[in-house]
Image (tube, rainbow, N blue to C red):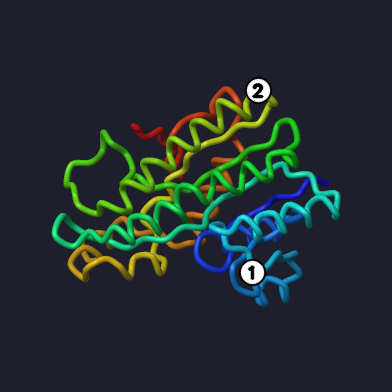
Amino acid sequence: MPTKVIIGADRGIAHSIAQQLHAAGNDVLAVTMGDGSDLVAAGIAVESGVNVTSEDDVARLAKRLESDGVEIDQLFHVAGVMFLDDIETVDYDDVRKQFEINTIGPLRVIRALRGFLVEGAKVGILTSRVGSLNDNTSGGDYAYRISKAAANMVALNLHHDLSKGGVAVQALHPGMVNTGLLDAMTPEDRERAASILVTPEQSASNLISVLDSLTVETGGKFQHANGDILPW
């Protein structure tokens, strides 16, 4: 049975995706930076200590897949980081860090694992609606917006390349999810967002449904977890 691989499964959305896919009877490999001990205790296979900014870590992950004879039919790349800023506070080291994790991270991982993707496989890269150029009506959040806009281009480029082998790639927006990433928001912004917040479990369920329905013909787009197609 092909395996569903979740990158960044330590907590939040990816953690819930791994749990839900496992509960549904799928073969799951959860890739974590930490030890993933709670996932292991639940009977989920874990590759721990993987930092998506590390060539060595990603190469080790690929070697495990090769040695275990793994074939991937779904890959969720969720690992990401967010530090908020404005024109006065933007920190170029933060820009570089977010770009390394949020943009180069999925490119590095999927490039290394593309040989394990079976024909008909589906790849979802979590970006964010704040990376949409057309949807940006407020400005701010320079580093995060830049990294996610670039991640959208990574997803589209990968779709063009991998679709030649029957693999569909989609940039995915998880919705406004109540995870630790929102700790970076001001209390006022959190209060304004309260009415549209969803739980990690709800977002995970929606994202699983979106990826299940993805085909090469419908791939290469920017899609909300609720199914809506978003503007680039």
Q: Of the numbered discs in the image, which one, if any, rests on residue 150? A: none
For marks 2 and 1, give the CA distance. 32 Å
Task: Name the element at disc 1.
Answer: loop
Q: Position of residue 92 (x, y in %)?
A: 29, 57
Looking at the image, which is closer to me, 81 or 219?
81
Residue 128 to residue 49: above or below: above
Q: In this rendering, would 156 be left or right of 180?
A: right
Single out the mark in the foreground, 2 or 1.
Answer: 1
In the picture of the structure, the residue carrying the numbered disc 2 is: 164
- Kindly check if marks 2 and 1 are in contact, taking CB atoms under 8 A apart as contact: no
Q: Count numbered badges in the picture.
A: 2
Q: Position of residue 205 (x, y in %)?
A: 55, 53
Report the side of 81 relative to 66 (left or right). Answer: left
Vertical position of residue 184 compared to residue 216: above or below: below
Query: Which image quarter holds the C terminus?
Result: top left
In this view, 206 is above or below 41: above
Residue 208 percent across, percent down from the top left: 58, 47
Amino acid type at image mark 1: Gly
